[in-house]
Image (spheres, rainbow, N blue to C red):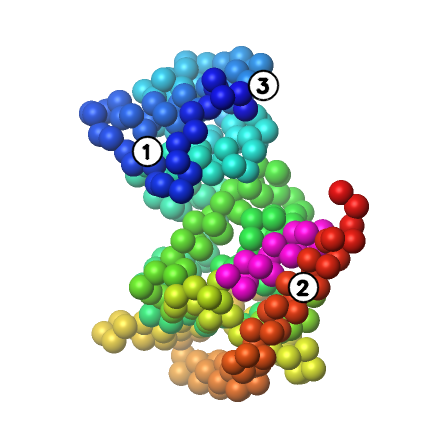
Amino acid sequence: MPAAHMRQPDRDAPVVPMQDGGDRLSDRMLGDELRAHRERRGYTLADAARVIRGSTSKISRMERGQSPVKYRDLNDLALFYGVSREDRVLLEQLYQQTSNEDLFARFADVTPNYLKRLIRLERSAKWITVYESRVIPGLLQTEDYARALTRMIELERSDNEIELIVGLRKQRQLMLGQRRPNFVALIWEKVLYQPYGSASMMAEQMRFLRQAHATKNVSVRVLPDWYMAPPTSVYHMTFEEGQSQELAYSEHADGANYITNKPQLDRTRKLLTNLRANVHKGKKNTEALERAVAHWEGLAAEQPG
């Protein structure tokens, strides 16, 4: 984007809102960026209005910072304008400063009720342990990996809906590395070598896993490829004393099950205990992650372009 159209703040610093009544500076900044992207592509107010199924006056008010921007409208316009990943980050930062919209309201169209319950529980969990034998756990997926996987599974979804699903996953990742929850991912080693996109995309995903493992309160543990990994997924949460202290979650084709009865929870704990006992230990675990990074970076280097 031409410099005249895009103000470039310090991207290492958060965008800090300045309140000045109903017409906030952050609202005007977000609207100004949306207008700049529209004009850069040569689109009219009417073109943009059709994208969000609204009126030209609504677009005009949004661009002047006089009408709040809904997340779905922001997503649809960013796709329509062909906004780059870097510029999308700026739009997301500005949106975070302007919005009091609930997380579920933003992603209501792509969030089934059973997943909404899980997301609410995640926020109050003390420990989350996830086991995967087929894919990288959702909370540790990069945008491109999540996008590729979603396209593969959610065949009926539009591009806009897929971007909303990826956006929700990004929002859920924000809790990682915080004071809580503590997050443990148990991943079968073969998953690290299962391609869901280009070698460069997979290399980025492996680097993200390596970085996550070095993050406070996050642990990525790799089960050796020779291990007979059970072909299931496990999502287990524990909570502070005084609450219902434990539950497990399992998705299936038509929804999800929340497991709270003692016999099933005992079996889940036993499975996780067995898995933890068989992961690579210490240096070998780090080496397993490094091998996966090197594998995909090597393949990416061999590919043209």
- Residue occupying the point 45% across, 43% down: 107
Give the percent coordinates (x, y) of residue 242: 23, 74
Element on which disc 3 rests: helix
Q: In which quarter of the image is residue 8?
A: top left
> Is residue 91 magenta-colored?
no
Three-letter amino acid code of the residue under disc 2:
Ala
The residues bearing labels 2 and 1 have C-alpha atoms spaced at a distance of: 41 Å
Quadrant into which the N terminus falls: top right
Label 2 or label 1, whichever comes before in sequence order: 1
Q: Looking at the image, which residue sits at the far left? A: 21
Q: Residue 98 carries which label?
A: 1
Q: In which quarter of the image is residue 100?
A: top left
- Up-down relation of residue 85 to residue 134 (above or below): above
**Mark 3 touches mark 2? (CB < 8 Å):** no
The kind of secondary structure the magenta stretch mainly shows is helix
Label 3 or label 2, whichever comes before in sequence order: 3
Query: Depth-wise, is mark 3 or mark 2 nearer the camera?
Result: 2
- Any part of residue 160 in sight: yes
Three-letter amino acid code of the residue under disc 3:
Arg
The magenta-colored residue range is 196-211
Residue bearing mark 2: 294
Give the percent coordinates (x, y) of residue 74: 46, 31
Residue bearing mark 3: 41
Q: Please give left or right for residue 48 compared with residue 93 in the image.
A: right
* CA neighbours of label 2 inside 10 A, class few (<14), some (14 to 19), many (20+): some
- Residue occupying the point 50% across, 14% down: 45
- Residue occupying the point 40% across, 23% down: 31
Three-letter amino acid code of the residue under disc 1:
Thr
- Up-down relation of residue 20 to residue 213 (above or below): above
